[in-house]
Image (spheres, helix red, strand yellow):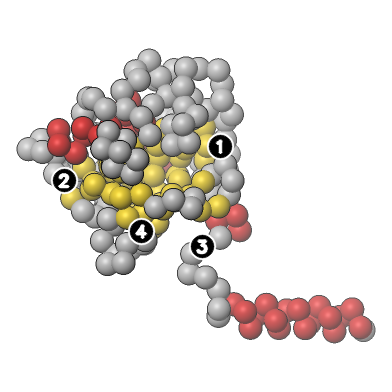
Amino acid sequence: MRGIGTLAAAALLALGLEGCASPVMDYSQMPRERGQTEVENDGHKPLQCVPYARAHSAIKIFGDAYTWWDKAAGKYPRETLPEPGAVMVLNNYAGADRAHVAVVRRVMSQREIRVDHANWLDDGSIYVNDPVEDVSSDNDWSVVRVYNLRTGGWGGRLYPVQGFIEPANRMPDRNDDNSAERPDLVAGGGSGTHLGATALASEINGFR
């Protein structure tokens, strides 16, 4: 009886604390999503963010990541808010020539998106369905933080967002999930996925 009473007290305490929970979701407790897996580094040449973003989006820009925003002018719509299929450009977080590009996979809420990108941790790996959170004071996606799929926690650094480059002919719905059309995703599970570098790494344009 004493053990049952202790368990009941613990349950009541948990319910009491539920209302005080942080608005930031604990991704380690999320149900695993289907259609994805984790593949460790498979020995291929490390992949950079630019060739990956170009191969997995309709944005066909060449050159270092920090040049993408300017090169998109007049060719692709440049927006301040994310849409599925757009390329997010992080720039000037460690010098004017330091940038990163990532493909927006899904818009989860006004404050959260999921992205697919390569070489985020300077390891040449691919990260799929990686959470990114808008932490700007005006909720305008000018500053974000990125979830670290290796450590299972939010990264401590904040990154300025230059904007989102959208395909020339936009059609998908904001909440479309194109996983069925993605050849680089295979059966398995994970709220977010880290994939090993692939043979696409023949190009070295762009870097984190």
Q: Give neighbour class at mark 4: few <14, some 14-19, many 20+ (Cα, 10 Å).
A: many
Along the line of sight, which residue is nearer the eye, 181 or 122? 122
Mark pair 1, 4: CA separation: 26 Å
The residue located at (42%, 32%) in the rendering is 118
The residue located at (59%, 77%) in the rendering is 18
Nearer the viewer's eye, disc 1 or disc 3? 3
Q: Earlier in the sequence, mark 2 or mark 3?
A: 3
Residue 196's spot in the image, x, y percent?
Answer: 52, 28
In the picture of the structure, the residue carrying the numbered disc 1 is 37
Mark pair 3, 4: CA separation: 13 Å
Disc 3 to disc 4: CB gap under 8 Å: no
Label 1: element kind = loop
Which numbered dot is residue 134? Answer: 4
Which numbered dot is residue 78? Answer: 2
In the picture of the structure, the residue carrying the numbered disc 3 is 25
Label 4: element kind = strand
Mark pair 4, 2: CA separation: 18 Å
Instruction: Please give left or right for residue 108 compared with residue 191 in the image.
Output: left
Identify the image quadrant of the N terminus: bottom right
The amino acid type found where label 4 is placed reads Asp
Nearer the viewer's eye, disc 2 or disc 1? 2
Q: Give neighbour class at mark 3: few <14, some 14-19, many 20+ (Cα, 10 Å).
A: few
